[in-house]
Image: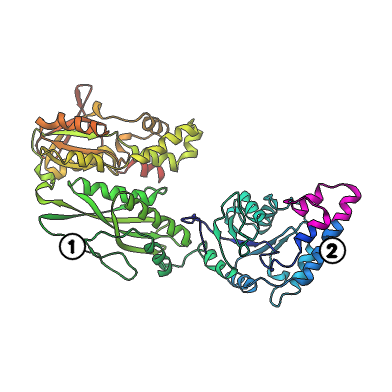
């Protein structure tokens, strides 16, 4: 079995088969002899050539075609594994169908030569006798899907010829290509799967069937783990089926830093969010995120392909950030109604470089990197796109908002900041937005903070989304922004260094006496610092 890369996430609710060359062996109809007797030009299909004729010439050609079909049906034999494949899928409870360019009479005669299959095993049979355009047009596939009451994108179509792949592709179906040995054709559109025999079909179909409750089956977990990049030399026991822990060897004066964080709001790019959000927290310690463990909880009804796509996204995001995915747990459970990822990130930092919020002192300046609420802006554009369209946002507007999801990492900003001895603490902005993050920083440091509201930057896209939805950007989830406490004599140099690294930054406040309170000013006057009982995105999505 061959796939054109990582398979797309899909569900299978019905399977359709081409007939000649798929369920039967290709030697049935003598297509070369047929084209020769018809006088069809080289490279043309017999049916298309016949339809180009008129009058008596067309009637004679149709008679020739029917004779060849009947002769082929008299020689038809089941393709290897065809009967077993159909009966196994029938046992799985899937509706099945045939979509062919043949006449129904020829299909019936051919199936009469099968030992264990008849028309009774198929819930729909679409032939050229039906009032639809035949393959490569998508009409026959769409007609069959409609008859079965299944959305086209949840239909799997299996065929041996270029017209089968093209018809399935145009219909939006999941395509499986079964070429004859040494006769693999050039295809305009790559199929979702290529197989060497029908015995390979059932495992592919199962990728689109709902999983049972409990752990992700080992066959799928092993498939995922087998594609991971090699772990670094510090991993003594890494990710593997049956492994319950990760053993990490750290020597010298390094400190292991770890952070767990579940992703509960995002649905799109869930795997990527889980890696970035957890890596951000390691970076705030002054360390480098190196190892990641995940607990992935999937609701009943999840298919293997959906699970593998999410796991693949986590693995790809780790590899892109130089992080080793060293283990975790994957389970299908009715405890969740949508996929949920809870991650634990581990990293190292030299003991002398560890940034602890207890090191903050009165007089330190507070620097904010990037603009606030970029994560929330992207999230709301993704989840509430229809509502925002109805309120006047264009597709271009929504695209600009969603693009902000590429700015969720604070790793670059933290790496710049940790070079400054005067940087005493870092804290990333997450759920609850900048309002909550500032309060958390004050509480953890034990010092009160004074914040200049006018200096906190907001993207125009964020302002627009919040205005339309009645939200406050200060309370909107904001991964991508970093709060940095820095000694006053290095604050300007820090902002300049961040700018040189392509990171927008601004001094937005200062640390005052101990106490853990937050006060604010706006327009040069005292102002109340906002507080939110729940993140604005959670409120809107809830």
- Which one is in front, 346 or 147? 346
Residue 451: tell me if it is visible: no
Q: What stretch is highlighted in magenta?
A: 35-61
From the viewer's perspective, tell me whether residue 55 is left or right of residue 254. Answer: right
From the viewer's perspective, tell me whether residue 9 is left or right of residue 312. Answer: right
* First-in-chain label (1 vs 2): 2
Quarter of the image where one finds residue 87: bottom right
Q: Foreground mark, 1 or 2?
A: 2
From the viewer's perspective, tell me whether residue 512 is left or right of residue 267. Answer: left
- Which one is in front, 229 or 488? 229
Residue 516: tell me if it is visible: yes
Under circle 1, the secondary element is loop
Mark 1 → mark 2, Cα distance in angstroms: 75 Å
Q: Residue 231 location in percent, x, y?
A: 28, 60
Q: Which residue is drawn at 60% across and 52% down?
A: 187
- Which residue lies most toward the right here? 56
- Which one is in front, 368 or 28? 28
Q: Give the main secondary structure, helix, strand or loop, of the magenta stretch.
A: helix
Q: How is colour applied across the structure in the image?
A: rainbow
Report the residue marked by disc 1.
Answer: 249
Q: Residue 371 location in percent, x, y?
A: 29, 33
Q: Residue 355 location in percent, x, y?
A: 13, 45
Q: Residue 295 location in percent, x, y?
A: 33, 60
Q: Residues within 10 Å of mark 1 (few under 14, many from 20)?
A: few
Residue 59 is one of the magenta-drawn residues: yes
From what the image shows, is residue 257 above or below residue 469? below
Residue 221 marker: none
Q: Residues within 10 Å of mark 2 (few under 14, many from 20)?
A: some
Report the residue marked by disc 2.
Answer: 67
Under circle 2, the secondary element is helix
Quarter of the image where one finds residue 97: bottom right
């Amino acid at each position: 079995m061959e796939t054109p890369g990582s398979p797309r996430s899909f569900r299978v609710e019905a399977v359709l088969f081409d007939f000649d060359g798929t369920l039967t062996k290709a030697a049935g109809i003598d297509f070369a002899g047929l084209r020769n007797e018809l006088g069809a030009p080289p490279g043309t299909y017999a049916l298309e050539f016949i339809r180009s004729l008129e009058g008596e010439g067309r009637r004679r050609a149709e008679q020739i075609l029917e004779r060849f079909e009947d002769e082929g049906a008299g020689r038809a034999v089941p393709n290897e594994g065809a009967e077993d494949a159909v009966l196994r899928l029938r046992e799985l409870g899937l509706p099945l169908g045939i979509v062919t360019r043949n006449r129904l009479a020829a299909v019936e005669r051919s199936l009469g030569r099968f030992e264990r299959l008849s028309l009774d095993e198929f819930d729909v049979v679409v032939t050229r006798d039906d009032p639809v355009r035949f393959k490569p047009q998508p009409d026959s596939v769409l007609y069959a899907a409609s008859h079965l009451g299944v959305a086209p994108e949840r239909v799997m179509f299996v065929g041996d010829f270029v017209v089968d792949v093209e018809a399935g592709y145009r219909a939006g179906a999941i395509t499986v290509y079964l070429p004859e040995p040494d006769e693999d054709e050039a295809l305009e559109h790559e199929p979702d799967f290529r197989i060497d025999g029908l015995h390979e079909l059932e495992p592919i179909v199962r990728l689109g069937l709902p999983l049972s409750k409990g752990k992700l089956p080992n066959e799928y977990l092993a498939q995922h783990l087998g594609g991971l990049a090699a772990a670094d030399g510090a991993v003594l026991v890494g990710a593997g089926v049956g492994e319950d822990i990760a053993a990490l060897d750290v020597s010298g004066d390094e400190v292991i830093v770890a952070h767990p964080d579940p992703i509960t709001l995002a649905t799109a790019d869930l795997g990527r969010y889980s890696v970035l959000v957890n890596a951000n927290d390691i970076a705030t310690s002054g360390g480098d995120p190196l190892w990641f463990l995940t607990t992935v909880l999937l609701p009943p009804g999840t298919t293997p392909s959906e699970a593998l796509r999410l796991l693949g996204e986590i693995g790809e995001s780790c590899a892109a950030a130089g992080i080793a995915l060293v283990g975790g747990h994957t389970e299908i459970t009715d405890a969740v109604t949508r996929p949920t990822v809870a991650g634990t990130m581990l990293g190292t930092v030299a003991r002398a470089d560890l940034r602890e919020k207890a090191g903050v002192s009165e007089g330190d300046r507070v620097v904010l990197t990037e603009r606030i609420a970029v994560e929330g802006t992207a999230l709301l554009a993704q989840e509430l796109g229809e509502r925002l369209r109805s309120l006047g946002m264009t597709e271009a507007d929504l695209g600009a908002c969603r693009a902000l999801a590429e700015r969720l990492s604070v790793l670059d900003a933290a790496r710049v900041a940790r070079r400054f001895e005067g940087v005493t603490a870092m804290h990333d902005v997450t759920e609850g937005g900048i309002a909550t993050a500032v309060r958390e920083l004050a509480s953890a440091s034990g010092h009160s903070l004074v914040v200049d509201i006018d200096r906190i930057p907001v993207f125009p896209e964020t302002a627009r989304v919040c205005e339309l939805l009645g939200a406050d950007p200060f309370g909107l989830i904001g991964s991508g922004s970093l709060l940095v406490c820095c000694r006053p004599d290095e604050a300007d140099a820090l902002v300049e260094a961040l700018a040189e690294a392509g990171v927008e930054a601004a001094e937005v406040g200062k640390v005052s006496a101990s106490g853990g309170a937050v006060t604010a000013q706006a327009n040069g006057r005292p102002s109340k610092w906002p507080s939110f009982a729940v993140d604005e995105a959670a409120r809107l999505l809830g």
